[in-house]
Amino acid sequence: MQNSAVDGLSSPPNFGSGHPSEPIVEHILRQSGVQRVPSPKVAMFIVKNFIDAEACRQLMAQIDSKRRPSTIADANGDYAFRTSETCDLDSAEPLVVELKRSIVALTGIDPTHGEPMQGQRYAVGQEFKAHTDYFEPSGQDYAQYCSVAGNRTWTVMLYLNQVEAGGATRFKAIDKIVQPETGKLLAWNNLRPNGTPNPSTLHHAMKVRAGTKYVITQWFRERPWI
């Protein structure tokens, strides 16, 4: 797997993924090819060509073969809030193992804090309306999802293809729109510097207008995932 961000880095430091986040930010910025999104509100980073096109093609095929309707926590009654499909990737599959290793090397986060990796597929007209990746502490499902490993801290998302039209990720609070590109990685901290959930990470997976959008998502938690 081609990965300019982690060339030469064989032993990531295995930071905890919660608070403080400064060591993770500093580690990411030391890697080659990393662009920091200029915002005082969210720690966010972009790496282009994180993996090559052939690896993306293989991952898209895996998503196609095992996709299911996506779900949401704290359902709000809007049946069209999240209309994508999700694939639970096989954690023992060599390409998935290598991708997680590369993400861990980029972030320096202890891999035991990572959730099982997922893929998402968006057909024409599908979207995920504005949401945050952390679980709202006041939400009815908070205890169910966070009692063991804590809340989500970092999100690492990998675009697997360039969509014909639509499908961008919009962060309204920081006036940032990220367009899908083959092999582009987007990573952000879901917490504020003081360790509390950051509402400025609200983002919208915008409707696909033409083609199909594929992404991989790796979430990290405050404590090891069991």
Image: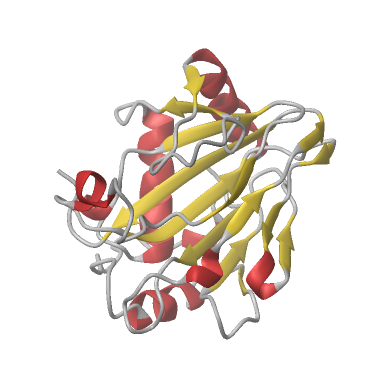
Residue 50: percent from left, percent from top? 58, 52
Residue 30: percent from left, percent from top? 48, 77
Instruction: Residue at 27% x, 70% y: name it.
Output: 18
Position of residue 177 in the picture relative to residue 209 (left or right): left
Q: Examine the rendering and report whether any part of residue 184 can be seen.
A: no
Residue 53: percent from left, percent from top? 66, 36
Position of residue 25 in the picture relative to residue 159 (left or right): left
Instruction: Residue at 32% x, 38% y: name it.
Output: 116
Residue 128 occupies quadrant: top right
* Placement of 151 over or under 67, stated as above or below: below
* Placement of 81 over or under 105, stated as above or below: above
Instruction: Residue at 34% x, 75% y: name it.
Output: 196
Point out the residue furthest to the top here: 65
Position of residue 118 in the picture relative to residue 214 (left or right): left
* Placement of 206 over or under 45, stated as above or below: above
Residue 95 occupies quadrant: top left
Residue 170 occupies quadrant: bottom right
Q: Examine the rendering and report whether any part of residue 186 can be seen.
A: yes
